[in-house]
Image (spheres, rainbow, N blue to C red):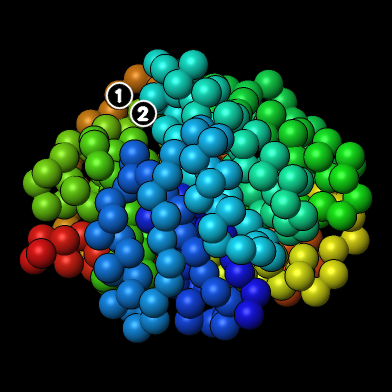
Amino acid sequence: MQTILVTGGAGYIGSHTLVELLQNTDFRVVSLDNFSNSLERSYERVQKICKRNFETICLDLCDKTRLYEALGQIGHIDGIIHFAAYKSVPESVKEPLLYYHNNLTSLNNLLSYAVDNGIKHFIFSSSCSVYGNADDLPVTEASPLKKAESPYGHTKQVGEEMISFVSQAYPAFSAVLLRYFNPVGAHLSGLLGELPLNRPNNLVPIITQTAVGKNALTVFGKDYPTRDGSCIRDYIHVSDIADAHVKALDYLLSGKNKTRCSIFNLGTGTGISVLEAIASFEKVSGKKLPYTIGGRRAGDVVSIYANNSLAKKELSWSPQYGIDDMMLSAWKWQQHLETE
């Protein structure tokens, strides 16, 4: 049985990927997380959905000594899916050194372990933020990477470069870099979804919390050069993102990769404005959302959406859910949280 290590497995995208792995593969799955931005209860939710056990490790990836000790007890690892990172754009603008230390030290330690122990397959959780304010839309994997608009985006650019150079230096090592656009929504069961420990920075949990009176919704900027003045993003269902990881893993393990460091955009290919996303939620929930218009937020790009044709072709992957599905699943998850 092949062993797959998932770092950050208790987090939002990590936990949904655990579900996909446990439901659709026979891998031995080991999840590593230090719960700095997640809850251990996520594992209970995953098990409730999947009815299948998996192994867990509580560990900070920045502690190289403990990392080597803990992973050494697992035995041979066939592949790593690396999610664990801080991910808030506004927080990274305020605390840049925190982001450079956590995101890059942890990646360096994990790559070192992979090289030292002959782990050949590595999937990296990257971001469309690497494109910055792109000159042309939709962006393809060949689009030039512009200056990062935030320290978070810069850590993803540097992380991609690190992995690329490692794949060049060690011929046995191969990687897939998955550039997410804007993951939203929740598992269709309503039992698992995005759960920020502090005040959320992402749009959809702010929307759902506003709908139950636990937050206040601000649209940051209505003077952008877009069709309604608000930022445009490529929102993609978190379960579609999770499915892409399973397909990327098969891509590597089956030797289908054409280069040792492959890059894929994960988006729907459709740009949705912040105001359009709010309107979608209002439609599927039947709730009118109060919101205010605020100033532009530091670190935000104006507009970004994907050309996803390469992922469709190479990974045999295609997003299954539209914006209304995303909003409805997020609302179902928020309602579940209100009953816990």
- Amino acid tagged 1: Gly
Asked if labels 2 and 1 touch by Cβ distance under 8 angstroms, the answer is yes
Residue 148 appears in the figure: yes
Above or below, comparing residue 78 to residue 210 in the picture? below
Label 1 SS: strand
With 215 as the anchor, is 62 left or right in this view? right
Above or below, comparing residue 10 to residue 126 in the picture? below
Above or below, comparing residue 136 to residue 117 in the picture? above
- Amino acid tagged 2: Phe
Residue 207 percent across, percent down from the top left:
26, 48
With 194 as the anchor, is 267 left or right in this view? right
Residue 60 percent across, percent down from the top left:
44, 39
Residue 251 percent across, percent down from the top left:
76, 69
Position of the C terminus by quadrant: bottom left
Look at mark 2 in the image and give the residue it sits on: 220
N-terminal of the pair, mark 1 or mark 2, is 2
Residue at left 33%, top 54%?
194
Residue at left 28%, top 51%?
39
What is the spatial separation of the Cα atoms under label 1 and label 2, in whole angstroms?
5 Å
Look at mark 1 in the image and give the residue it sits on: 294
